[in-house]
């Protein structure tokens, strides 16, 4: 059994049980990019539809570790005007995570159910489940190590994960850069072994902040719907003091959003 792997802003996974024992060097590589306590990211999302119309959104993403095994993530949207003030909360816990969303127009905090897990978040190519995985707060039951490959000219570890039945995916392949430990490509297969989505990172977009490597730009493509969303990390800070109330669903509607310099 391997220990949990938490890797904010990389599409990676946690695992209780693995089909094979993951080599210590891979686990150490991944865990080396995890902030000690908190992180704040200012991001931009550019969602392009089939007609090549691009919607641009801005948000701040707050991440906080809760003890040794769990963490919480809250995303606050500031642009465009029609979704300003929208908030999305993920609380990692056993046996299942909890997700909540607040839309100013509805004036109500709603829980995201398993039936909605594959739905798009704010019209992007990221589903609710994708955002869980993006911030390392989702657990898969089975994990396999495959032979090393090369992605964008760089040697990578190859890990295959098999999600639970509630997932929108049948299996997920992650290609992890051996040098930076950043996931350079993620292939997401839906039922029937169909490659539905692909998340890629240009190695040139991998940056160092406070000794941690992270992708400053990610591209998610929906291969079936022929749409894509580009996620750009405009700023990231670690070790920021974040109040627990920021991750409390009962306060999601009225919580004050901290201004990070």
Image (tube, rainbow, N blue to C red):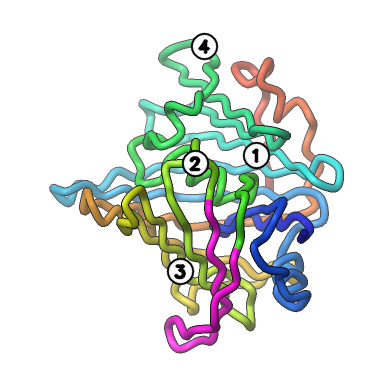
Q: Give the residue at the far front of this rendering.
A: 19
For the residues bearing labels 4 and 3, Cβ distance under 8 angstroms:
no
Q: CA–CA distance between discs 2 and 1?
A: 13 Å
Report which residue position mark 1 lands on: 73
Report which residue position mark 2 lands on: 129
For the residues bearing labels 2 and 1, Cβ distance under 8 angstroms:
no
Question: In percent of the image, x 48 and y 41: which residue is there?
Answer: 167
Above or below residue 257? Residue 135 is below
Closer to the chain start, of discs 2 and 3, is 2
Residue 106 in the image, given as x and y percentages of width and height: 43, 12
Closer to the chain start, of discs 1 and 3, is 1
Q: Residues within 10 Å of mark 1 (few under 14, many from 20)?
A: many
Residue 12 in the image, given as x and y percentages of width and height: 58, 58
Question: In percent of the image, x 71 and y 29: which residue is there?
Answer: 246
Question: In percent of the image, x 79 and y 58: which residue is there?
Answer: 3
Q: Which residues are magenta?
A: 144-162
Above or below residue 177? Residue 248 is above
Question: In percent of the image, x 55 and y 34: which residue is there?
Answer: 76
Label total for image: 4
Report which residue position mark 3 lands on: 185
Q: Give the residue at the far left of this rendering.
A: 51
Report which residue position mark 4 lands on: 108
The rendered magenta stretch, by its main secondary structure, is classed as strand
As for residue 148 lying within the magenta part, the answer is yes
């Amino acid at each position: 059994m391997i220990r949990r792997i938490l890797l904010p802003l990389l599409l990676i996974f946690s695992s209780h049980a693995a089909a094979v024992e993951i080599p210590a060097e891979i686990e150490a590589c991944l865990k080396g990019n995890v902030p000690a306590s908190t992180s704040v990211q200012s991001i931009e999302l550019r969602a392009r539809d089939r007609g090549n119309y691009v919607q641009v959104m801005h948000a701040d993403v707050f991440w906080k570790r809760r003890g040794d095994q769990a963490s919480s993530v809250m995303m606050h949207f500031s642009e465009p005007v029609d979704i300003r003030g929208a908030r999305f909360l993920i609380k990692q816990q056993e046996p299942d995570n909890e997700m909540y969303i607040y839309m100013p127009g509805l004036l109500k905090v709603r829980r995201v159910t398993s039936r909605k897990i594959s739905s798009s978040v704010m019209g992007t190519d990221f589903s609710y489940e994708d955002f869980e995985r993006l911030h390392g707060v989702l657990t898969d039951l089975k994990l396999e190590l495959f032979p090393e490959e090369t992605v964008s000219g760089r040697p990578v570890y190859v890990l295959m994960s098999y999600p639970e039945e509630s997932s929108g995916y049948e299996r997920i392949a992650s290609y992890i850069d051996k040098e930076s430990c950043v996931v350079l490509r993620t292939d997401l297969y839906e039922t029937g072994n169909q490659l539905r989505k692909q998340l890629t990172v240009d190695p040139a977009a991998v940056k160092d902040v406070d000794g941690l490597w992270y992708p400053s730009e990610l591209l998610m493509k929906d291969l079936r719907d022929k749409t894509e969303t580009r996620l750009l990390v405009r700023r990231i800070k670690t070790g920021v003091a974040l109040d627990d109330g920021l991750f409390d669903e009962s306060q999601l509607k009225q919580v004050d959003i901290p201004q990070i310099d």
